[in-house]
Amino acid sequence: MSGRTGGEHGGWYLEKTCGARQLSQIFTGDPGSEYHYEYTECDSKGTRWRVAVPHFPGLCTGLPDPVKGTECSFSCSAGQYLDMAVQECTQCGKGTYSLGTGVHFEEWTELPHGFRSFSNNIYGTEYGNCNMSQWEARGEYVASNTDECTATLMYSVNLKQEGTVSFEFVHPDSNIAFEFFVQNNQCQPREENLRWMKTTESGWGYHQVKLTKGTNVLYWRTTAFSMGINTLKPVLLRNILITGAAYTSECFPCKPGTFAPRSGASFCQLCPKNTFSYRGAFVCTPCEADKYSVAGSASCTPRPPCTDKDYFYTHLPCDANGETQLIYKWIEPKICNSTMKGTKELPMSGTKIKCPPCNPGFHQSNSTICEPCPQGMFSNGTICRECPVGTQAAQGFEYKWWNTLPSNMHSTVMSGLNFEYQQEAGWEVAGDYIYTSAGSSDNDYMILTMNIPAFSTPQQSTQDRESNEVSRITFVFDMNCSMNCQLFFMKTVNLETNTLIESWNGTRDKQSYMHHLKRNANTTFSWAFQRTSIRTDGGREYTADVAKMYSINITNTKEGVASWCKPCALDTDSQCISCPSGHYIDKKTSSCISCPIKTYLPSHLVFGEEACTECGPGTKNNDIHSLCFNDCHYTTSMGRRKMHYDFSLLQNMTTFAGKPSFTSKGVKFYHQFSISLCGNQGRKLATCTQNVSDPRGLENEPRPSINSYVCQSIIMPSDAAGQNIFMSSQPIVLGDQLIGVTTETTLEKITSPVDLFPGEHADIKDIIFYYRSKEVTQSCVFGRATTIRLRCNPLKTGIGTVSVPSNCPEGTCDGCVFHFLWETEQACPLCTENDFHIITSACQHGVQKTTPVWLTPRLCVRGIDLPPQTISICKTPDFWLKIGVISGICSALLLTVLTGYFWRKNQNLEYKYSRLMMNGPSKEGELPAADSCAIMEGEDAEDELLYSTRHSILRKFRLFSEKRTSDGFDCVPLKSSGEHMDM
């Protein structure tokens, strides 16, 4: 941009303000002069003077005298400039324009004078060099960086009255944070103008902000959050317009490719296609016959010889005879020369063939037009029929024949160079499929859209909006590419932010993709195909790279058509009704019957008892049978012991972040996970948001978010407008269906390897929750899955801590199955009588205590309480010692007496024996005769009889008393050893 805009001081010059350049206003005199004109500051009366200021210091002679200037409120209209020599507004000549009180930046071959681009790494230069991350001028616009550095485009202006700044922008990628804000002369941000720019849905967006009198520093700042996952698309800026100056000192020449045919123009017009213009043109010059140009071109390009890349094929609509024809057309705009030698001629049209049938749900009202069947009827593409009793039309759209583009679909081309929409078709019909045509450049986006205003209420009415499937869209496609082409599948809900659902790169075999919808709203689906993302200056080198769409099927649309009839429940009048939640349609009676216990009913399956799906282990159905969930209780057996668990304190959403990671630029980021484990009737409480477009929530609008049992987002700290905040991006669902809860390491082909989290208790196994996500990706053809191990750890009080595998810091080792370890005391089983033992204390002072004590380590929580301590009366050790001593003394005395007694008895027996021996007979073996039975003098009267059998001491005493004679003496019979000896 050239030219000067004025205020009180006129023109623009640079000075240091807020660490940036500031624009003040000056005016030059005639070209080649040694001075320029300026206005002095306005005095209290609103007057000022025009003075001549030399260009070089020290030149003070030959300058014009000061003259009284115009009023301070003076201004010129659009299309005029202020001639300082006469101080009057003058119309701009042909080929030039002016905004009157503003300045317009529309050329970006380089950064215009006064703009500054700089970048930085918020973590310091030691984490990465960001010197190359700058805003780059690209002719029609200026483009931002696409790496993790923070790049800022800055412009400072000093206005003499209130004004505005407006600009057009393209913000196609939600993984780039794009903010625009204004600072005042104190370098403080104006919060009312702080704005995070939203992503643009189609083409260029527009934004305007008011500016105050004085210094205004404008900032456009971007930071990418790709972490190397995607190839990001930069933010583009153009047509920056600033108003608020009092006047402009000269008119701006029209940029190349534009012209101003009349004097007093406030803007320049684009040259039509096949014309061009130079700078300052008031008319466009036609291109020569062998050259071409697009609209707004600064030059013409030679037309190359036509090749097979310059035309495409399509089918004509059916004629009155029900026939169609394959024809070939030149790609518009036609840029090749078909008259040159060796050029490729346009092939001849094919022979006429019979038109394909109408798509299911349509019928041929005449031989040329396919019309939808009336409500309540269905067709296979030929004749409409009424649905039988007990059934109703399954409304939707099923497109598999492509003779014409359906009425709710649209095709266009968006330029990959200036992001303007072209009046061209991006997809062409080909009978069995539709395919991508060619645009002006290989960078162009071939866009196909389909709009569904609303969906029907599901056949099973349910209040569970999180689990209720409103519709599903399925399409079959393939891609054939020699370069790294891309196909993007997106959706826009209620004209909100466009959301990328999935993308594919390179050649792809014929395959099917399905997406589930859970929101009943106006939804637009988009498919965008780009042959190459490498910037080119035009040309069609890769037109053979194509994407083909064979079929598109979307169910349960409100204004759709039916290709079949689905069973329904009937009321008493044989009218179709919706079954209550958790009820299926009985095949015999067509009535609604509740599903059995521990089963749930998917919203798209309601016919027959087999539609009721059994819940997994450790789960139960919710009240409306829409899903299976765990009620935060679990029971398992370990040997003969049965253990009960209660996870009620873990039922609320838990959020945690993994270890920090760093990009190649040194930017720190985290993987943040949210978990909704159990309870709450199966409600999905885990939420992950996308706040890149509005991290502070200043727009008071709902942010894009997802709800599930387990989800992940990327968290990155950002220094936004001088304030540290956290940016959240790339939310994904890791689990929206609970498969089961068990101690087994494998469930429905989902495995939780033991070696990922060593240290499991031998006696108490980990409780594992298994989740699955329905959405499939390129790398996860069966969808993502998640396992959460609950491990008993008494040291982790409260809800404990959640961690990821040490060798997989992102939570997954293969990108599809995520693993988490949740250590907490709440994962311990409920306490039972097997978890404590009894300790009996010593008897002290006649008292003994019995105390129950938990086993160590205590691996249980809550459950039963410890029994109370018991106290009993007992005998002390001193008492028993005394009893023992007394008993010992008595025993010793008794033994002493008995010993003396038996010693005396032994003496008596010896004496008697010796007497017998002395009085023995002469014959050997003959006993002597008894002299007398009386006790001899000196004998003891208490001698007792001798017995050969053994008796107890008491028995001996009794026998002793019984054998005595009445006179108190013992009688001891003596028997002779002889045969006939008399006593």
Image (tube, rainbow, N blue to C red):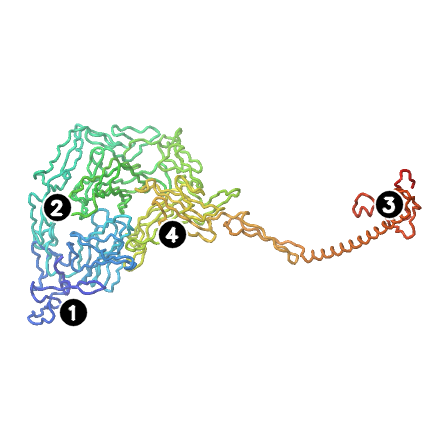
Q: Is residue 558 visible?
A: no
How far apart, in angstroms, are the residues tagged by discs 3 and 4? 101 Å
How far apart, in angstroms, are the residues tagged by discs 2 and 3? 152 Å
How far apart, in angstroms, are the residues tagged by discs 3 and 1? 159 Å
Residue bearing mark 1: 43
Whether pointer 4 and pointer 1 mark residues with C-beta atoms closer than 8 Å, the reply is: no
How far apart, in angstroms, are the residues tagged by discs 4 and 1? 63 Å
Residue bearing mark 3: 963
Name the spot of residue 452 as percent of width and height, x first.
Answer: 27, 40
**Viewer-nearest of discs 2 and 1:** 2
Q: Quadrant of the N terminus?
A: bottom left
Query: Who is closer to the viewer here, 376 or 834?
Result: 834
**Viewer-nearest of discs 2 and 3:** 3
How far apart, in angstroms, are the residues tagged by discs 2 and 1? 53 Å
Which structural element holds mark 4? strand
How far apart, in angstroms, are the residues tagged by discs 2 and 4? 54 Å
Whether pointer 2 and pointer 1 mark residues with C-beta atoms closer than 8 Å, the reply is: no
Which structural element holds mark 2? loop
Residue bearing mark 2: 294
Q: Quadrant of the C terminus?
A: top right
Would you say 525 lies left or right of 786 here? left
Would you say 389 lies left or right of 979 here? left
Disc on the earlier residue, 4 or 1: 1
Residue bearing mark 4: 656
Q: What amino acid is found at the position of numbered circle 1 in the picture?
A: Asp
